[in-house]
Amino acid sequence: MQQNNVFETLIGAGVVAVAVAFLAFAYYRTGSGSLSGYELNAKLSKVDGLGVGTDVRLAGIKIGSVTDLTLDPKTYLATVHMNIRDDIKIPADSSVLVTSAGLLGSQYLSITPGGDDKMMAAGGYFENAQGSIDVMNLVGRFATGANTSNQPPPNKPKPQTPPGKAPDPGAGP
């Protein structure tokens, strides 16, 4: 009986050790453990699909993650706070946009580096930033051929009467 308890205890300890090793591997492999870096920010009109922990990528390589999302109550723009690895310096004229990994993939922030010799300082803001695109709106517009944007239709100009000519009374309004 005593031998069964020792055997069960060893098996249980082995299972716990494997679980801890797996969690440690996942923690370090996903970069969750690396909090060193510097903060950059972007003001975007739409941040659909983004959240804390969302990847920040440059040339398809993860170089950071989103740390916070806030809303500016005066401009109604979302401020995206991101943590960028210390060894990656971003040129000051770089741009950032919200994009997705394929048609059904998750959203991430993609940085396109500029050509400026000056690098962005910690706490800096991207000058050129584009928010997320409403894919369903685009699909609907393509499928129906309808204008489903939020813009009002353009006003048609009323026909003008040439100067010096009286309007035709039977022409209507």
Image: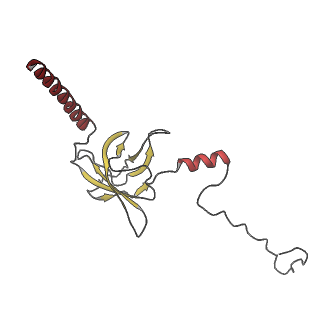
Q: Residue furthest right?
A: 170
Above-or-below relation of 160 to 29: below
Residue 159 image offset from top left, x and y in percent:
79, 71
Residue drawn 24% across and 52% down?
38
Residue 34 image offset from top left, x and y in percent:
22, 44
Residue drawn 67% across and 52% down?
146
Question: How many badges with numbers are in the image?
Answer: 0
Q: Quadrant of the C terminus?
A: bottom right
Residue drawn 84% across and 81% down?
164
Residue 42 image offset from top left, x and y in percent:
37, 57
**Quadrant in the picture for residue 32:** top left
As rendered, which of 19 and 60 lies closer to the eye? Answer: 19
As rendered, which of 167 and 131 lies closer to the eye? Answer: 131
Q: Would you say 68 lies left or right of 97 here? A: left
As rendered, which of 154 and 3 lies closer to the eye? Answer: 3
Residue 94 image offset from top left, x and y in percent:
37, 52
Above-or-below relation of 7 to 144: above
Residue drawn 17% across and 29% down?
17
